[in-house]
Amino acid sequence: MASTSFWSSLKEEARRNYIAVFEQEWPTWLAGIFLAIVALLIFLWQGPWGVAAGYRNLGDWIVYGAGAGGDRPFSPWLHPITLTNTGLVVGALASAMLSRQFKIHRAPPLEYAKSLIGGVFMGAGAVLAAGCNVGGFYTAAAMFDMGGLAMMAGLIAGAWIGLRYLLWEMEHLQQKGVEQRPSSDVWVKIQPYLGGTVLILVIAAFYGFSWVDKTDLGGLLFFGLLIGLIMHRSRFCFVRAFRCPFMTGDAEMVKVVAMSLMIYGMGTAVIKWAWIQEPSMGVTHNFWIGSLFGGVIFGIGMLLAGGCASSTLWRIGEGQTKMVVTLLAFAITNSALASLLKNQDLYDKMGQGLFIPDKLTWYVTVPSFLLFFVFWAFVAIWNEKSEKFVVF
């Protein structure tokens, strides 16, 4: 029997694990579990996970930089959500490089136009709902804010409308593909080293924030990196949970999001019920008018753009150029519309947060929450078999 040295064995095992983590796609159910855990860590670390506020901070800076008025915006280096979003992009970038998948992807002209319009719709919808698919639906629902469930209904309706347009487009418009330049062998070989460097720099940034007594902000940057890594490795996208049941009947992503929300919600129940965090924290969404109609508008936008608020960020990290258009359109629209509604005293008329346990008690809310998302999953499974709501 040939002898194997410790170092050769270690090298072989490290290579095997590297392939499993960075070269093989993660199952979406595992990503759903990881995502819920990281979201709960963010909640314990500082507050509920959100994304849209980071877009707005970017939009505020663009509007301010263009001389369109307004006060100087909050520094992006000190803005919690902007830092989480930055970490998400950087995490996806590191993941793409470590898996040798980073590449600048170009798209046909019509796709850029759809990204622009989709970004405008998502930016507007996020203002009305006081959050995007993450803060306004995923986190809001897990915080037991009724606005999260209202936005969920709006996202379902908006996805159906958006999909109807995409089907019309397939029948009446033809797009020419864009030739993608192949990556050079040298670029493919050096990507893992660059990706590893990115990870080290983010960890160094965390220590840097801690050095200046801003550990909370450094932690949010790091948590964002974990989310970007999780989403990129699994191709996790909330859009699929609302699009696929209508397009193909596929129920996989509905089941994953429902499971993830049940984990997130039960963790939140423990944290809030035990007063580890203030029970009303995160209950800020515009139930029901803003959440519902904002969800419809956002749902249409994410179908047009081909990505939601979170997937826009991780797709930018892997080199999708059309999503940069979505990012900018979302940011500017969100900033401008929010300022307009507040200046006209219209924002507060969209509704207000409604904490479900205040109305039903924790004893009723917790089992009802679980049963609701189990029911959503089973409806999707039934639809997958019967194709009752499939419009493709």
Image (cartoon, helix red, strand yellow):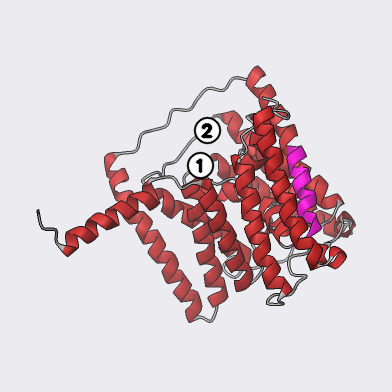
Contact? badges 1 and 2 (CB < 8 Å): yes
Where is 102 relative to 173, above or below? below
Q: CA distance from mark 1 to mark 2?
A: 8 Å
The dot on residue 107 is 2
Q: Which segment is the magenta one?
A: 144-158
Q: Amino acid at mark 2?
A: Ala
Q: Residue at x 40, y 62 (%)?
A: 199
Q: Amino acid at mark 1?
A: Gln
Residue 314 in percent (x, y) is at 53, 49
Main SS of the magenta part reads: helix
Q: Quadrant of residue 185?
A: top left
Q: Residue at x 70, y 67 (%)?
A: 269
Which residue has dot 1 on it? 320
Q: Residue at x 48, y 56 (%)?
A: 90
Of residues 205 and 260, the one nearer the viewer is 260
Residue 23 in percent (x, y) is at 37, 46
Residue 95 in percent (x, y) is at 43, 52
Count neighbours of disc 2 (C-alpha within 10 A) and say few if under 14, some if 14 to 19, many if 20 or more: some
Of residues 21 and 385, the one nearer the viewer is 385
**Quadrant, the C terminus:** top right
Q: Quadrant of residue 377?
A: top right
Q: Quadrant of residue 103?
A: top left
Magenta stretch containing residue 148, yes or no? yes
Can residue 304 be seen from the camera position used here? Answer: no
Where is 325 relative to 95, above or below? above
Q: Is residue 179 left or right of residue 337?
A: left
Q: Residue at x 50, y 60 (%)?
A: 226
